[in-house]
Image (tube, helix red, strand yellow):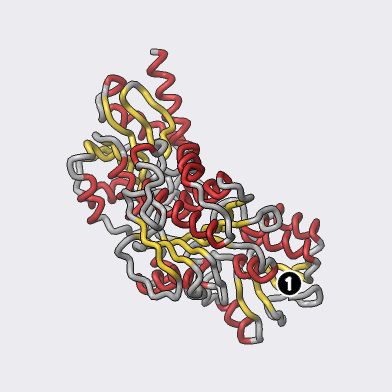
Amino acid sequence: MNAGEKVLIYGLGRSGRGAARFLAREGVRAEWHDARPSAEDEALMHELGLARGDVGGTYRTVVAAPGVPIDHPDLLALAARGAEIIGEVTLAARLRPHLPLVGVTGTAGKGGTTVLIAHLLRESGLNAREGGNIDPPLLDVVDEAEVAVVELSSFQLERVPGLRLPVAVITNLGVDHLDRHRTVEAYHAAKLNITAGQEAEDVLVVPAGLKVATRAQVRPFQPDRITLADGREVLPDADLPEGLHPANAAAAVLAAEALLRRLGRPVDVERLAAGLRSARPVAGRFETVARLGNVRFIEDSIATRTLAVEAALTRAPAPIAWLVGGRDKGADLAPLREAARGRVKRVIAFGEDGEKLARDLGLPFETVTGADGDGVMQAAARAGLEALGGPEGTGTVLLAPIGTSFDLFQDYKARGASFTRAARALATEEVGA
């Protein structure tokens, strides 16, 4: 790619805006297309000096947003006219070939693992930055880092031609996004693209027992043992800070070790252990947001995948008042029934499909409503507390909703923030009563 080449940025989401800023800095002749650009996006494109593109035109390269399906008619037509369709990760790898990239994917846990790897690398003396599917966009950090740790969704991994990662991580493989991929096999195939370009000197970190066809060196991790590749323990999982998942920590340590060795840097077990002790969970990922006596309120609004919800149910101190609701995305409920057995005291159903999900789970439940999203979260938090015996009770009010947030909120972050406000207000109200 050179300054004279014409590039189309297709879709102005987070990654598209990052690509626009990056290409403008590079002096690449870029144009943009978005079916429904916001006023802010149009202002940014004007500020960057990027013109609106013509999807009926000819481009050598199209940088497509992850949310645009690979079989979108516009992309198929552009490809038929000779365009190569890539994403932000391939763009970064091609224009910053000397920047080491650590890629992380999985059905659940990839965001927390990404952040933790970057933290461990910083504790080990590297200027590491995280980005990609989580904030910030990868292309916003590539010029600020010695190493970039990238969370990669299945959507992003559909368009990574030729991508070679020195270190890649698969946290787990479950079921998700069948509305996009249509079959579990296609979803898993997209995820496994993370290792497709790896060679014999590269490292792939996977859960023990997961069989993956790869040319890379495989480093399996155990969910309850945080060790180096040679088996030396870095930290007992009981010593992890609250909210950090042991499996994420185990994978992160192996990935950090692999990259340090690849770069010829020392692997200091004490620094890695100190990094684990000083790490904090990502906001909105199984985070204790309030306490009232022996009751804690845990916010895991992003838990809409079966694996993520199952992990939350397993980790939360019982008895649990489980807040379930939102828009049903067809999650497999069978493992959740098993995880809830003997641990969930009552389900608090809310939102568009909360009652349906609760009935399908076959657990005792009550339904709450409200005038708006905040009202619903306030009612749910209060009902959860009452289900555990009120302020004198014991257990966990857990928001691990199964359903997506779009029935009542802009996104899972807004739903989580609403629950957090409700829980903290309730705790303050009861303490002052």
Q: In the image, is 66 to the left or to the right of 365?
A: right
Q: 144 or 68: nearer the eye? A: 144
Locate the N terminus by quadrant. bottom right
Q: Looking at the picture, how far across and down is residue 129, in whole percent?
A: 61, 51
Callout 1: SS: loop
Count numbered badges in the picture: 1
Q: Looking at the picture, how far across and down is residue 406, in whole percent?
A: 46, 51
| One can see residue 284 in this view | no
Q: 359 or 253: nearer the eye? A: 253
Which residue is rendered at x = 50% and y = 47% of the image?
268
Which residue is rendered at x = 50% and y = 66% of the image?
155
Q: In the image, is 148 to the left or to the right of 152?
A: right
| One can see residue 432 in this view | yes
**395 vs 145: above or below:** above
Q: In the image, is 120 to the left or to the right of 1?
A: left
Q: Tell me the amino acid under the disc marked 1.
A: Gly
Q: 22 or 103: nearer the eye? A: 103
Which residue is rendered at x = 26% and y = 38% of the image?
366
Residue 37: name its quadrant: bottom right
Residue 190: name its quadrant: bottom left
Q: Looking at the picture, how far across and down is residue 269, in whole percent?
A: 47, 46
Which residue is rendered at x = 32% and y = 58% of the image?
331
Q: 401 or 286: nearer the eye? A: 286
**41 vs 202: above or below:** above
Q: How crowded is mark 1: few (under 14 residues within 10 Å), some or many (20 or more)?
A: some
Q: Name the residue under label 1.
A: 53
Q: In the image, is 114 to the left or to the right of 308?
A: right
Q: Looking at the picture, how far across and down is residue 283, in whole percent?
A: 49, 41
Locate the C terminus by quadrant. top left
